[in-house]
């Protein structure tokens, strides 16, 4: 599943169409595509892994899910996987194998934009309060909770926990203050490192724990285990990541 930094890169590719009028809208998504024709794309906003194409009175929410992808310019993929294709004078934006929903713009007011770890309005103190309200939650689940750390996915989760030396099955209520603060800091820091490495196609070369065999700190075997309620795979070092 594409994580927040990848969606930031997608926005950068799409933003050339801001201010442009939709000439046509096609695709398999069960939305009123005709309503988009003739409308001007006013803004693109991100909420973690979600992208909102904002028009007058209505917005389209794109979520790439596990295997979604996009194209700009011209279509090269088959129609059967095309969920939404918008044509503009300058070209096209096309979204495949993804979730597409149309929402009223009033819905945007209900989103907690401060939960997005890559946003300029990211609020770590609010995230901390949400964690404190669920002290028995495993930290591996907490990092994947999009209401707390919007945009964080499994890669970021594993690398952040390795950076701060915390076992993924630790309970958030048992984390010392330092580790809790480090969790806030590194969730954001690693997301921007992810973005930097993604731009240079060096992301996997910088993984410390995710899909690694040996711990780069002590040389011990990296454990691979499905953890938390979500049963997502965690990669961790039992020597360098403490269980709280």
Image (cartoon, rainbow, N blue to C red):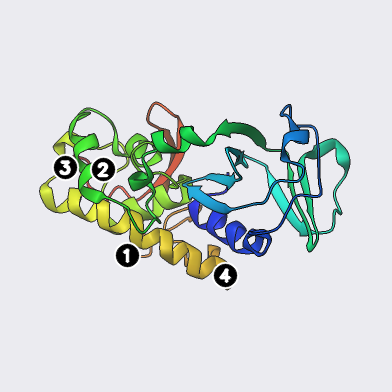
Q: How far apart are marks 4 and 3 (CA)?
A: 33 Å
Q: How far apart are marks 3 and 2 (CA)?
A: 14 Å
Q: Distance between the residues labelled 1 and 3?
A: 22 Å
Horizontal placement of 156 versus 104: left or right? left
Disc with the residue nearer the chain's start (4 vs 2): 2
State the mark number for residue 24.
none
Picture quadrant where residue 65 is located: top right
Q: Which of label 4 and label 2 is nearer to you? A: 2
Disc with the residue nearer the chain's start (4 vs 1): 4
Q: Circle 2 sits in a helix, a strand or a loop, which is it?
A: helix
Disc with the residue nearer the chain's start (1 vs 2): 2
Q: Name the residue under label 3.
A: 175
Of the 4 image quadrants, the one containing the C terminus is top left
Q: Mark 2 points at which residue?
A: 127
Q: Name the residue under label 1.
A: 217
Q: Could you tell me if the residues under marks 1 and 2 are in contact, i.e. CB atoms within 8 Å? A: no
């Amino acid at each position: 599943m594409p994580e927040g930094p990848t969606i930031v890169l997608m926005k950068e590719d799409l933003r050339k169409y801001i201010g442009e009028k939709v000439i046509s809208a096609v695709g398999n998504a069960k939305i009123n595509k005709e309503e988009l024709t003739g409308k001007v794309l006013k803004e693109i906003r991100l909420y973690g892994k979600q992208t909102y194409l904002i028009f007058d009175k209505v917005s389209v929410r794109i979520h790439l899910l596990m295997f979604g992808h996009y194209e700009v310019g011209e279509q090269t993929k088959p129609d059967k996987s095309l969920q939404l294709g918008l044509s503009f004078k300058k070209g096209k934006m096309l979204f495949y194998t993804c979730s597409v929903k149309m929402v009223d713009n009033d819905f945007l007011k209900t989103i907690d934009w401060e939960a997005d770890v890559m946003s300029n309005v990211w609020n770590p103190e609010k995230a901390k309060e949400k964690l404190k309200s669920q002290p028995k939650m495993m930290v591996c689940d907490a990092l994947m909770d999009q209401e707390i750390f919007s945009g964080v996915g499994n890669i970021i989760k594993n690398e952040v926990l390795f950076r701060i030396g915390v076992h993924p099955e630790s309970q958030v209520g048992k984390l010392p203050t330092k580790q809790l603060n480090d969790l806030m800091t590194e969730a954001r820091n690693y997301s921007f490192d992810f973005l930097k490495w993604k731009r240079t196609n060096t992301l996997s070369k910088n993984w410390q724990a995710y899909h690694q065999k040996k711990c780069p700190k002590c040389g011990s075997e990296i454990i691979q285990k499905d953890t938390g309620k979500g049963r997502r795979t965690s990669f961790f070092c039992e020597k360098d990541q403490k269980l709280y």
